[in-house]
Image: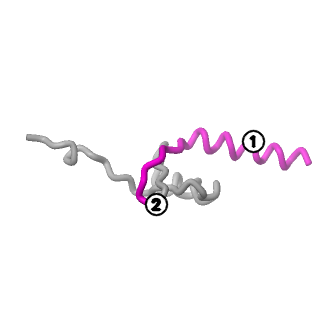
Amino acid sequence: TKMVRDLVHYPLATVAPNENLESVMEKFNQTKYWNLPVLDGEKYVGFVSKSKLFNAYREKLLYFSEE
């Protein structure tokens, strides 16, 4: 009989809620994942997507380029 634990995928990387954008981008580049789990200590609090991160980074660049 198959158990759920036999089907669980353990990610190569996780991120913390207070981690900076550059660090998370590097993890995306290293793993080639499109989503990374966000852990607060050992507690799962959600996930961040590569597309959402790049949109936030692009907005940050636009903000600083307008100054």
Please give the residue where the numbered disc 1 appears in the rendered image: 59
Q: Is 40 displayed left or right of 12 in the figure?
A: right
Q: Quadrant of residue 62?
A: top right
Give yes or no for residue 62 being in the magenta stretch: yes
Packing grade of label 1 (10 A; few <14, some 14-19, many >=20) is few
Query: Considering depth in this image, is 29 or 1 the residue closer to the camera?
Result: 1
Give yes or no for residue 33 being in the magenta stretch: no
Where residue 38 sits in the image (x, y, percent)?
A: 49, 50
**Quick one: label 2 or label 1, which is nearer the N terminus?**
2
59 up-or-down from 38: above or below? above
Where residue 54 sits in the image (x, y, percent)?
A: 64, 43
31 up-or-down from 4: above or below? below
> Residue visible at 64% across and 54% down?
21
Query: The N terminus is located in which quarter?
Result: top left
Give the colour scheme of this rendering: one colour
Q: Secondary structure at mark 1?
A: helix
Q: Secondary structure at mark 2?
A: loop
Proximity of marks 2 and 1: CB atoms separated by less than 8 Å: no
> Residue visible at 43% across and 49% down?
44
Amino acid on which disc 1 is placed: Glu
The circle on residue 41 is 2
> Residue visible at 67% across and 39% down?
55
> Residue visible at 38% across and 53% down?
11
Question: Depth-wise, is mark 2 or mark 1 nearer the camera?
Answer: 2
1 up-or-down from 16: above or below? above
In this view, the residue farthest toward the right is 67
Packing grade of label 2 (10 A; few <14, some 14-19, many >=20) is few
Query: Considering depth in this image, is 5 or 30 the residue closer to the camera?
Result: 5
Where residue 24 sits in the image (x, y, percent)?
A: 57, 55
Amino acid on which disc 2 is placed: Gly
Give, as a single range, the part of the protein colored magenta. 41-67
